[in-house]
């Protein structure tokens, strides 16, 4: 690590030098054989590539209680741009990784093999996961090794995702492709009659920066140059839809970028779920905001649209990210009930704590409560079963956004800047955005297993460095 760090302000973004992150292991891992002078790689013309849907992974074995999977993190070649292939890191070589479809109450066991030449660790984001399987940053899979991850799935149906969490490495690893969907289904949700099967589509949005030869360019804090948006791994794809209802599970898989998504000419969509599962009732909205790591589950209704209609999903800053091309009508027995899954009443908290996220003016690193992440220090000790209120503030009042992700539990937002949360933020959450100066009060009950976990900013170029802390749940 360098002894001196500089911070440059560029158009509001804070840039830390990549050297701060370039451990020798990472430097050795970067591709250095580029061969003859490459053809210039360019994004395809907009809406000429079909949006792929990450394939659902098949279990290698099933018992009455458990689905068993194997997965391997390795280098792979992805055809993202025209003119050149892009080297990525992919679970099973796929970009994004394969989708796991789990059932609430049925255990999933994944044997994760690391075929990269650096440590990895797998975190199931939003999962109520035993500590040994949570991807604690020091619980790594050494190169060539395999680690068994066990997920009890004792939580309601929802959209989770899995991604790398290795100490100091996760921002580059996730950026290079170690991310995928993990969906939990349950009978109560299935009984609602929401669009299902081929009409239930996960969509991962993220950004990237490409070099002229098509390679992914990683520099920490490189927000402004990651200008290419990837939608399920492709640039501005189209997606053919029938004139009926669809459920789309939107995930922001970017390291730093937030999305503000709008459909067509500002049309209303029904948000039905958020990080931890279904909302109490559908929330009609014209914009979907997602900070890194957040999910939004929406139903879009193309019923009655003439064949040939094109509907664009666009981000306020990046522009169009996806085009829906409406074909013919299709039989549609799906519905969006007025009541989805009522939220339980909030209990009384046992403990109230405060957390400040901000840059340290002494050394220009992002910290929580003035401390840089130390995996060997316990920052917060929590009695198992307690209900706690955490008041979390983004103390960087000028330009730097953060967000806040708590492992192990789903929480509820009690207030944002002293006011009640917006309807879509009132559901179960594991990640909340924090604009400069904002304070969010959230409440969680730590009913899960005892053990050691982390909480952190999910702008993972921040957390990868220091904006992370540990909590230990004790009996
Ligand atoms: Cu941050």
Image (cartoon, rainbow, N blue to C red):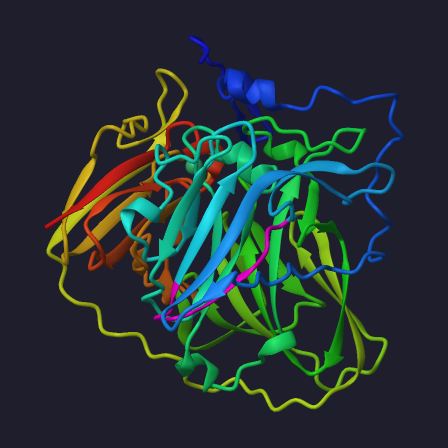
Q: Which residue is rendered at x = 19% and y = 40% of the image? A: 380
Q: Please tell me whether residue 234 is drawn above or below residue 139 in the rendered image.
A: below
Q: Is residue 20 left or right of residue 349?
A: right
Count every numbered label the image shows and give the total: 0
Closer-to-camera residue (169/395):
169
Residue 179 image point, x, y percent: 55, 47
Snapshot quadrant of residue 418? bottom left
Q: Which residues are magenta?
A: 96-107
Residue 294 image point, x, y percent: 47, 54
Residue 129 image point, x, y percent: 32, 54
Looking at the image, the residue that sits furthest to the top is: 3
Snapshot quadrant of residue 430? bottom left
Q: Please tell me whether residue 186 is drawn above or below residue 86 in the rendered image.
A: below
Residue 288 lies within the magenta run: no
Closer-to-camera residue (187/418):
187
Q: Is residue 172 left or right of residue 426?
A: right
Residue 308 image point, x, y percent: 86, 76
From the image, which quarter does the N terminus lie in? top left
Q: Is residue 348 visible?
A: yes
Q: Which residue is rendered at x = 53% and y = 49% of the image? A: 71
Q: Which residue is rendered at x = 45% and y = 53% of the image? A: 110
Q: Which residue is rendered at x = 49% and y = 57% of the image? A: 69
Snapshot quadrant of residue 26? top right
Quadrant assignment for ligand 1: top left
Q: Is residue 214 left or right of residue 455?
A: right
Q: Is residue 68 left or right of residue 391?
A: right
């Amino acid at each position: 690590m360098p002894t001196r760090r500089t911070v440059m302000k560029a158009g509001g973004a804070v840039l830390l030098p990549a050297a701060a992150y370039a451990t020798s292991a990472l430097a050795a891992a970067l591709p250095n054989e580029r061969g003859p002078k490459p053809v210039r790689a360019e994004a395809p013309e907009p809406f000429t590539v079909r949006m792929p849907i990450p394939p659902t992974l098949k279990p290698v074995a099933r018992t009455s209680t458990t689905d068993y999977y194997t997965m391997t993190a390795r280098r792979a070649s992805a055809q993202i741009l025209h003119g050149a292939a892009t080297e990525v890191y992919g679970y099973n070589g796929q970009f994004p990784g394969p989708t796991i479809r789990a059932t609430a109450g049925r255990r999933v066991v994944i044997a994760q093999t690391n075929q990269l030449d650096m440590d990895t660790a797998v975190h199931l984001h939003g999962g109520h996961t035993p500590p040994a399987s949570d991807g604690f940053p020091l619980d790594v899979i050494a190169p060539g090794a395999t680690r068994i991850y066990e997920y009890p799935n004792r939580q309601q149906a929802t959209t989770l995702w899995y991604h790398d969490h290795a100490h100091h490495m996760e921002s580059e690893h996730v950026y290079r492709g170690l991310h995928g969907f993990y969906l939990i289904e349950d009978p109560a949700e299935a009984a609602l009659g929401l669009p299902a099967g081929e009409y239930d589509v996960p969509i991962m949005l993220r950004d990237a920066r490409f070099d002229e030869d098509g390679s992914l360019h990683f520099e920490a804090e490189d927000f402004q140059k990651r200008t290419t948006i990837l939608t399920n791994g492709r640039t501005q794809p189209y997606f053919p839809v029938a004139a009926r209802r669809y459920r789309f599970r939107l995930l922001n898989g970017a390291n730093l970028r937030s999305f503000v998504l709008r459909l067509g000419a500002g049309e209303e969509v029904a948000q039905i779920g958020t990080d931890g599962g279904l909302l109490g009732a559908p929330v009609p909205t014209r914009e979907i905001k997602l900070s890194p790591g957040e999910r939004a589950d929406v139903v879009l209704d193309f019923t009655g649209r003439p064949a040939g209609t094109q509907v664009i999903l666009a981000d306020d800053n990046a522009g169009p990210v996806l085009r829906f091309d409406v074909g013919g009508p299709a039989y549609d027995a799906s519905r969006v009930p007025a009541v989805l899954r009522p939220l339980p009443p909030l209990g009384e908290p046992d403990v109230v704590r405060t957390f400040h996220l901000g840059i340290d003016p002494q050394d220009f690193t992002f910290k929580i409560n003035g401390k840089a992440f130390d995996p060997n220090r316990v920052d917060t000790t929590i009695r198992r079963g307690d209900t706690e209120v955490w008041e979390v503030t983004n103390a960087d009042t000028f330009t730097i956004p953060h967000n806040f992700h708590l492992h192990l539990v789903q929480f509820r937002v009690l207030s944002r800047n002293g006011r009640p949360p917006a309807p879509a933020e009132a559901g179960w959450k594991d990640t909340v955005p924090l604009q400069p100066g904002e304070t969010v009060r959230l409440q969680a009950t730590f009913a899960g297993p005892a053990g050691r976990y982390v909480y952190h900013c999910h702008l993972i170029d921040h957390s990868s460095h220091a904006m992370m802390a540990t909590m230990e749940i004790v009996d």
